[in-house]
Image (cartoon, rainbow, N blue to C red):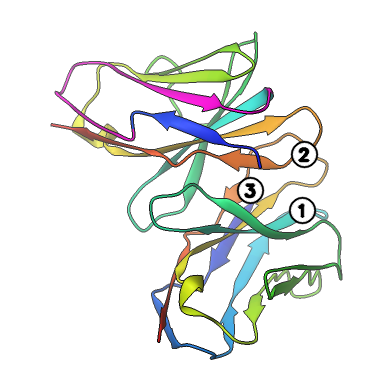
Amino acid sequence: GNSVTQMEGPVTLSEEAFLTINCTYTATGYPSLFWYVQYPGEGLQLLLKATKADDKGSNKGFEATYRKETTSFHLEKGSVQVSDSAVYFCALRRAGGGADGLTFGKGTHLIIQP
Amino acid sequence: GAVVSQHPSWVICKSGTSVKIECRSLDFQATTMFWYRQFPKQSLMLMATSNEGSKATYEQGVEKDKFLINHASLTLSTLTVTSAHPEDSSFYICSAVGATSYEQYFGPGTRLTVT
């Protein structure tokens, strides 16, 4: 079946540091890939997505590239801010599964210190 | 943007009782709603998919008689945990999909504690 593996947290960085959160997946075909962010007390929000190989999703300074050859979708940001502190979830939706539920990783708690 | 609410945000109930959790799409019509369950430090696990006016589709291993899902309107889905036991204690999260795109909008979650 489908699965998503992401690095365990918490990840603690200083403000303006470079961020990478690793995410790899197992799925058949070409699933759609997502990063969601959850701020304290709020629901998950879509951060970015990519639907085919070599696509790059980007939003709010975050980027992730769909790498079919390594089955990865690592999240990166060049300079993090305190406001980026949150839990980040990598997720996939199976190929062709437009209205299907998502398969999530365990989430990575990111803490940015001033 | 699209907003999804859940009620209650937290609930404590006694073992053997039933508890209902509501999921509402506040500013759009949700053709499909999903229910997820999240254990501490674990990923969200899809429990079931519900489409308005039809029976929910449950994931393998989820007891349909224990977790009753009703999607009676395009803005409301309910999850009822029947005869709750302490092992049902968890964080339950719903999401909703509108008619114009497949993007899922998530509720803030409901913390259930069964004593």
Q: Is residue B75 above or below residue B39?
A: above
The answer to whether one can see residue A78 in this image is: yes
Q: Which residues are magenta?
A: B9-29
Q: Are marks 2 and 1 in contact (CB under 8 Å)?
A: yes
First in residue order: circle 3 vs circle 2 = 3
Classed neighbour count for the residue bearing mark 2: other residues with Cα under 10 Å, few (<14), some (14–19), many (≥20): few
Picture mark count: 3
Q: Which mark is residue A1?
A: 3
First in residue order: circle 2 vs circle 1 = 1
Q: Are marks 3 and 2 in contact (CB under 8 Å)?
A: no
Residue type, label 2: Gly
Nearer to us in this view, A47 or A71: A47
Classed neighbour count for the residue bearing mark 3: other residues with Cα under 10 Å, few (<14), some (14–19), many (≥20): few
Which circle, 1 or 3, is nearer the viewer? 1
Q: Are marks 1 and 3 in contact (CB under 8 Å)?
A: no
Q: Which residue is mark 2?
A: A97
Q: Quadrant of residue B110?
A: top left
Identity of the residue drawn at 72% across and 42% down: B103
Q: Chain of mark 1?
A: A
Identity of the residue drawn at 45% across and 28% down: B62
**Distance from label 1 to label 3 (Cα)?**
15 Å
Residue B26 lies in the magenta-colored region: yes
Identity of the residue drawn at 46% across and 58% down: A39
User: Looking at the picture, how far across and down is residue A45, in whole percent?
Assistant: 58, 52
User: Looking at the picture, how far across and down is residue A22, in whole percent?
Assistant: 59, 76
The answer to whether one can see residue B61 in this image is: no
**Left or right: B70 as drawn, with respect to A51:** left
**Distance from label 2 to label 1 (Cα)?**
9 Å
Q: Secondary structure at mark 3?
A: loop
Classed neighbour count for the residue bearing mark 1: other residues with Cα under 10 Å, few (<14), some (14–19), many (≥20): many
Q: Which residue is mark 1?
A: A32
Residue A76 lies in the magenta-colored region: no
